[in-house]
Amino acid sequence: MNLDGYNSNLRRQLILGLGAVGTMASLPLIAVTQSKTTKVPYLGPSKIPNVSLLTHEGREVKFYDDIVKNKILVMNMMYVDCVSSCPLATSNLIQVQRLISKKMQGAPVQMCSLTIMPEQDTVSHLSHYVRQHNIPSGWLFMTGEPESVDLVRYRLGFYNTDPAIDGIVATHTGMLRIGNDKISRWGMMPTQAKPDQIVKMIEHVARWPTV
């Protein structure tokens, strides 16, 4: 099976399903019900989990209190040993982070990446990845207990409704979740979209004045 081709088709389907950038910002968080294939409980249509996670710096954080609350969340899923889409996404998001620092000075933007393979992506593994890719400070790479990671992943819409596909690590969607919890404004777009387009989306979700 050609997973790269499959991933490309999957990303195209997601983009078409989400619609244009202008409409994506109004998308709500996706409600997830308990299924036979996961242990993710239904928390309501807008409940963001406050589970404990660990950053690549070894710091314990509460996902809602420390990462989401009163911030503009810019988040993707990844794993260290990914050799296809993840390095490209990381490189692209570094450019996004640089643009944010220039165009949105003072905005409480929190960039973070959560591993989809917490059993192998330990703090030291993530820390090595950050150094290897020269990730600027302020961008957090996180891991945690598998149940906590799955809970965040599902609640923020990083999953496939087909359990057989969702269970294949190589088919992770390559999407970026952008959200402003304070005003319940959320969107999603590909991690490999043009950096300036991603920043425009962040500004739109943040309602940050464009200069």
Image: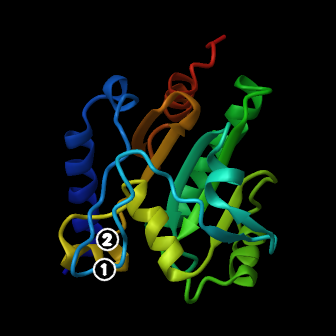
Residue 5 image-quadrant placement: bottom left
Q: Up-down: is 135 above or below 71?
A: below
The location of residue 179, given as percent across then percent down, is 52, 38
Task: Give percent across and percent down for residue 108.
Answer: 73, 35
Element carrying mark 2: helix
Let me know if residue 174 appears in the view: no
Quarter of the rendering occupied by the N terminus: bottom left
**Which residue is found at the position 80% from the left and 27% from the top?**
106
Q: Image quadrant for the C terminus? A: top right
- Per the image, the residue denoted by label 1 is 168
In which image quadrant can residue 189 be found?
top left
Query: Mark 2 packing: few (<14 Cα in 10 Å), some, or many (20+)?
Result: some
Answer whether residue 9 is visible to the viewer in this image.
yes
State the separation of the CA atoms marked 2 and 1.
6 Å
Is residue 65 or residue 189 the one in the foreground? 65
Judged from this view, the residue extending furthest toward the bottom is 120
User: Does residue 83 appear to the left or right of 27 in the view shown?
Assistant: right
Please state the horizontal and vertical placement of residue 77, each as a whole percent of the image: 49, 63
Q: In x, y percent, where is residue 204? A: 51, 23
- Per the image, label 1 sits on a secondary structure element best described as loop
Q: Of the numbered discs in the image, which one, if any, rests on residue 171? A: 2
Q: Residue at the spot x=51%, y=72% of the render?
A: 149
Mark 1: few, some, or many residues within 10 Å (few <14, many ≥20)? few
Is there CB contact under 8 Å for labels 2 and 1?
yes
Identified at 19% across, 79% down, the residue is 164
Q: Which mark is residue 110?
A: none
Q: Quadrant of residue 169?
A: bottom left
Instruction: Give the left or right position of residue 164, taking residue 188 as reference.
Output: left
Name the amino acid, label 1: Ile
Amino acid on which disc 2 is placed: Thr
